[in-house]
Amino acid sequence: MRIRSLRLKEFKRFSDLTVQGIPDTARLVVLVGPNGSGKTSLFEGLNYYASGQARRQHYKRAYHWKSMFEAEDNWHALHRKLQVEFVEEQPNDIEGWKKAFYFRTAYRHEGEFTSSAITRLGDPLDDNRRPPHLMAVETRVSDNYQRLVGNAVSALFDYASERTNTEIRTNLIGDLRDAMGRVFGDLLLQGTGRPTEDGTFLFEKGLSTGFNYANLSGGEKAAFDLLLDFTAKRPYFDNTVFCIDEPELHMHTRLQGRLLDEMYRLLPEQCQLWIATHSMGMMRRAMDLHREQPGAVVFLDFDGHDFDRTAVLEPATVDRRTWKRVFAVALDDLGELVAPESVVFCEGRRESPGGRDATFDADVYRTIFGGSYPYTDFVPLGGAGEVLKDALLVGRIFERLFSGIRVWSLIDRDDRSEVEIRRLAREGTRVLLRRDIESYLWDEEVVHLLAEASGRPEMTASLIAAKNDLLAELSDYGKPRDDVKAISGPLYNRVKRDLGLTQCGNTAEEFCRVTLAPLVMPETHVYRELEVAIFGPAATEVE
């Protein structure tokens, strides 16, 4: 099962929340935001909805309703206020609803356990130990131990099968053993010990064998619990929305991303994984997966919404600004110190009263490339001369402060010759292939996209003709015929008038920033040309 949208009314902290726009291809949904922003409340809504559909009502009037004064002593009244739309056809019977959702709360802990008998457990779909709500403490490790042992005994006495003990063991714990190895390196599941004689999970750790489950650290137990649960339950929950609240509990930041990798890898094909997290490691790895598999990973940002009013959440655009915001949640005041992987020093005058905004170029580059290059930031240093003079010094400071960071400079072409451009490339400075950034923003392809978006595609030809007429007039004023920046003002006025545009930017500069820049998308030719100029091989690399 995969969720496409949902709505929660008068539930927990939400007056009327709609979550929409989740792509059908999404396999991982990441809920981010500070403590108390509503992430667990959303899981609680899904849990209440799923329990009602499966006829397992866990109704608490004071707990589930948003307002005690409006609460009804009737679970049906609240259930009717919850809606979930799936990508697939929703289940049509109780058995289907039993497997539609699977929840793990943030209160997971089983410090130790031992087994003195082999116990036959029932169907996991009828498990009456599922958490009734997301505040419940749950223990699953010992149950999964018994399930694993029971499956081993059944396989051993399956006389129709010719599998050896080694094959049975590999089939039961092979995936789990490999996953633990990838997360921790030196911690491998060895087996179940003797289930009728103080049985428990045993591990290989470093040079030790028979390392008791009770001796694992809190982080090791937390990761093992989730991975064990995934491997034990996925044969039964194979068409399911898995919801895990704070999967990173007790784990070191470096290991959190590895744990997410393994849960994502173990996720059955027809399933969807939802996690609520504050973890820097989880969020960083989720962003990497988003970049590697577009459409498979989405982020729902709960920060900054007033849930006392009607609110709509849609997947956040994953760009540099999103990256900084979600990391600020994990790091609080240290969020601003998180360094990007790459820094491009560009033009942008520090002080220009009445002229171009100091951050114009950087803002445009961030808008265009924020989605494709979320770990790259653009930093204005001034005019071209200041970029050439200061970039080397500032770049060295960045490289000393942040290990592994890449820095380079970018300036407009203006009237520079090919010889000059190659010399600058050898010195670590990239040069745009056109005169300036406006030459890209007012490209004929972008003008056509603007006319289409405005519902006036037939105006494309006349607008391009107007642009060419304005450029032709530049020679009368002694200016270059390709200086698009010089005609931006009158061209902006013409376009706004002919297309009937309003609230699209009050100046030519703002129009370029907020209306034209978002149209330069990865599928356009102008985007690819600009991308090569900034991120492609430098001239010295292709000589």
Image: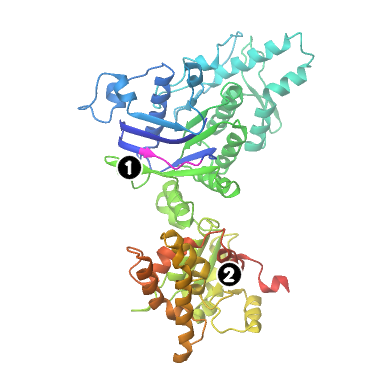
Q: Decide if residue 391 is on the left or right side of residue 82.
A: right
Helix, strand or loop for disc 1? strand
Residue 230 lies in the magenta-colored region: no
Residue 249 visible from this viewpoint = no
Who's the residue at 55% across and 18% down the image?
142
Q: Quick one: 147 or 453, which is closer to the camera?
A: 453
Relative placement, left or right, of 305 versus 465 is left
Disc 2, SS: strand
The numbered dot on residue 89 is none
Look at the image and tell me in which quarter the C terminus lies. bottom right
Residue 418 placement (x, y as % from top left): 65, 82
| Above or below for 233 versus 301 | above
Q: Residues within 10 Å of mark 2 (few under 14, many from 20)?
A: many
Q: Return the residue at label 2.
A: 408
Q: Are marks 1 and 2 in contact (CB under 8 Å)?
A: no
In front: label 1 or label 2: 1
> Is residue 455 among the parts visible in the rendering?
yes
The spot of residue 146 in percent (x, y) is: 59, 14
Identify the residue shown where x is 72% and y is 20%: 169
Image vertical order of residue 297 relative to residue 136, above or below: below
Count residues near mark 1 (Cα–Cα under 10 Å), then give few for <14, some for 14-19, many for 20+. Answer: some
User: Dividing the picture into quarters, in which one does residue 257 lie?
Assistant: top right
Residue 404 position within the rendered picture, expressed as x and y whole percent measured from the top left: 60, 59
Identify which amino acid the numbered label 2 is placed on: Trp
Q: Main secondary structure of the magenta part?
A: loop
Q: Mark 1 or mark 2, which has the lower sequence index?
A: 1
Q: Is residue 238 above or below residue 457?
A: above
Residue matched to label 1: 311
**Residue numbers of the magenta segment:** 18-23
Please tell me which residue lies in front, 23 or 158: 23
